[in-house]
Image (cartoon, grey):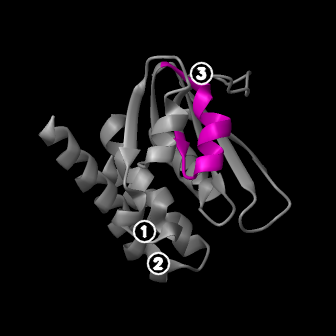
Amino acid sequence: MSRKEILLSGAGGQGVLFFGTMLSLIAAQKGKRAVATSSYGAAMRGGEVKCAIVIADEEIHDLIVDEADIVVALNEASLKKYGPKVKEGGVLICEDSEKTKAIVSTFNKQFELVSVPLRGLGPERYHNMVAMGILSQIDPNFDIELIRKALTKELKKKGKESVVEENLTAVKSGCDWYIGEKSKK
């Protein structure tokens, strides 16, 4: 991996920034350099949240993510705004619905679309970790053991060790869903 750009987006309260932190920690565990930049609306819950992560083998000088290798959009508004930033040949992970399919059809580029029934895979507060599980199956740099270590360390540091297993369950549900979908094809 010379340089990988990932764009995460959603609403406040969906764990977008935590997701970005996890990806950065995992990259660091693999000896990579990682920089995450984020922006969020004034509202604590429900406002727009975006996190761009750049992972590279060498120093990172350019932090701008105009076209991402992977885009994760956890809600419809984020899909409309940030979905088009998926790179030609990249991967877009989003909620599976008729509305999202209509939005994606306007992007006019070739990429892998991973439409996920997020609502069917667990509570909304864990959709970020469901997406993390899916990402672990798409990109081997984010293997499940590194996710487990990063989650455990970060949640314990925040005094939230009681939710480690719930988060890992959500990651596993994303992994299992993706594996199941791939086996159908």
Of marks 3 and 1, the one in the foreground: 1
Residue highlighted by disc 3: 58
Residue type, numbered disc 2: Val
Q: Earlier in the sequence, mark 2 or mark 3?
A: 3
Q: Quadrant of the N terminus?
A: top left
Q: Earlier in the sequence, mark 3 or mark 1?
A: 3
Q: Residue at x 38, y 39 (%)?
A: 114
Q: Quadrant of the C terminus?
A: top left
Residues rendered magenta in the picture: 72-88
Residue 159 visible in the picture: yes
Q: Residue at x 73, y 26 (%)?
A: 64
SS of the residue under disc 3: loop
Residue 137 on image: x %, y %:
30, 42
Q: Which mark is residue 163?
A: 2
State yes or no: discs 3 and 1 in contact (Cβ < 8 Å).
Answer: no
Q: Nearer the viewer, residue 41 or 58?
A: 41
Q: Residue at x 55, y 79 (%)?
A: 160
Q: Nearer the viewer, residue 105 or 185?
A: 105
Residue 24 on image: x %, y %:
57, 45
